[in-house]
Image (tube, rainbow, N blue to C red):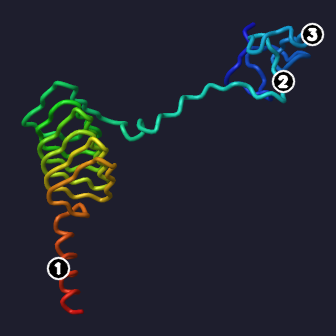
Amino acid sequence: MATPFFGKRENEIPTSGARPGPGNSYGAASPAAPGSLHAGSPAAPASPNVARPQMLEPAPAAGQERESGSKLTVGPNIKLKGVEITDCDTLVVEGLVEATMNSRVIQIAEQGAFKGSAEIEIAEIRGEFNGNLVARQKLVIYATGKVTGTIRYGKLVVEEGGQISGDIVFGTQAGNSKPAAVLNKSGLQAA
């Protein structure tokens, strides 16, 4: 009889009709001498004080949670021009992309370049971005990254060596930044 290892508990009654024996609850006899069986051997008896191994699914890596869903990768030496990218959770740019994009995440590799317009949640730039960028949650520019154009962001992280230039405004809507600037100017005039 094969001894079930996974999915059974000590206090469960086996469904195969086997009766518990003196060694364990599954009918396998106890070894005659300690150490006579190798650890992990199928005939090793179960002890109520020893935890049994359980089959667990591996935990997802930190980056995998963000990348679940639809993902488009534009590989090295590939040029993608004149397109509109929608319904893409993650765009990975290792080549050249000239496009309009409305998605969740963009990741531009060191050798990658994006030209055009992008409205996204999170931007991670290691290569080049040139155009209109709205990063609603966070814009991360790594040491090798270069961002130019009209940039709106929720949070900004720039590593030492990273470059950003152009019309840069905190806040993801251009309309929200103008009233704050006017209010600020009128506050200075009144004081």
Q: Nearer the viewer, residue 65 or 21?
A: 65
Which badge, 2 or 3, is on the more N-terminal residue? 3
Q: Quadrant of residue 27?
A: top right
Where is residue 84? Give x, y as percent.
12, 40
- Rendered position, 171 above or below 128: below
Where is residue 140? Give x, y as percent.
31, 49
Q: Are marks 2 and 3 in contact (CB under 8 Å)?
A: no
Where is residue 189? Give x, y as percent.
18, 89
Which badge, 1 or 3, is on the more N-terminal residue? 3
Mark drawn on residue 29: none
Q: Which residue is mark 1?
A: 182
Q: Disc 2 or disc 1, which is closer to the eye?
A: 1
Q: Secondary structure at mark 1?
A: helix
Q: Is residue 128 left or right of residue 61?
A: left
Q: Which residue is mark 2?
A: 47
On-image quarter of the C terminus: bottom left
Q: Secondary structure at mark 2?
A: loop
Q: Which residue is mark 3?
A: 33
| Residue at the extreme bottom | 190
User: How far, Cα to Cα, is label 2 from label 3?
Assistant: 15 Å
User: How far, Cα to Cα, is label 2 from label 1?
Assistant: 75 Å
Q: In the rendered structure, which amino acid carries the disc numbered 2?
A: Ser
